Image (cartoon, rainbow, N blue to C red):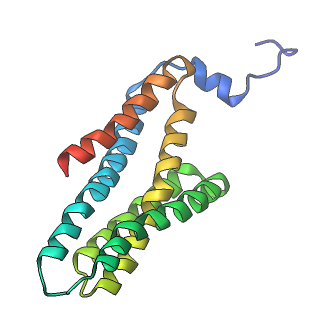
Amino acid sequence: MTATETPLPRAARLDRLPFTREHGKLVAGSGLGWALDAMDVGLISFVMAALVAQEEWGVTPTQVSWIGSIGFVGMAIGATLGGLLADRVGRRQVFALTLLVFGIATGAAALSWSVGALLLFRFLIGLGLGAELPVASTLVSEYAPARVRGRVVVALEAFWAVGWTLS
């Protein structure tokens, strides 16, 4: 580069790089998060059926519908807040935080003692899950070279099917 040339913008420099093992790790790590999210969405349907079948909690049809829906409410809020937070503090940090929220809330949901507790934990799971999805896809898209970006994002999306299959 000569003294009169201006440096390339960051995006242009990233697009020139080859697809490396580091890119693969980023896709695999983000994909694992996506697969876990899909497993949660798939497994809750089995949990709802089990709650209806057992009589210990005596869940009503309305309560079951709330159990199925409250996670999506959390996802809507989480997606909005997660994207804004990621723009301010960084995608990697927010991605890690979303997985932490999701993981702790999922563990807590497994220990739920009532429908109310399960609803609270399902909402928190939705917050983490909803924030993770746009942050992960944006993170992968930003670092993938332009020539393979579409394939990389499709590979990330394929992890959703893996998670559903495992559930």
Which residue lies most toward the right here? 4
Task: Please state the horizontal and vertical placement of residue 161, each as a whole percent of the image.
Answer: 29, 40
Tell me the quadrant of the picture where the N terminus can be found.
top right
Q: Is residue 40 above or below residue 123?
A: above
- In the picture, residue 86 is in which quadrant? bottom right
- Count the marks: 0
Of 21 and 157, nearer the camera is: 157
The answer to whether 16 is drawn above or below residue 119 in the figure is above
Query: In this view, which residue lies farthest toward the top?
Result: 2
Camera-side residue of 115 and 35:
115
Q: Is residue 19 above or below residue 119?
A: above
Give the side of residue 158 with respect to residue 45, left or right.
right
Q: Residue furthest left?
A: 54
In the image, residue 28 sits, relative to residue 120, either above or below, namely: above
Relative to residue 114, is residue 142 drawn left or right?
Answer: right
Residue at image point 18% right, 75% down: 52
Image quadrant in which you'd find residue 12: top right
Q: Quadrant of residue 62?
A: bottom left
Q: Name the spot of residue 101 as percent of width and height, x first.
A: 41, 67
Q: Position of residue 107 (x, y in %)?
A: 27, 72
Q: Nearer the viewer, residue 16 or 27?
A: 27
Rendered residue at 68%/30% (across/down): 10
Give the image location of residue 95, x and y in percent. Answer: 48, 54
The answer to whether residue 167 is left or right of residue 106 is left
Q: Is residue 144 left or right of residue 101?
A: right
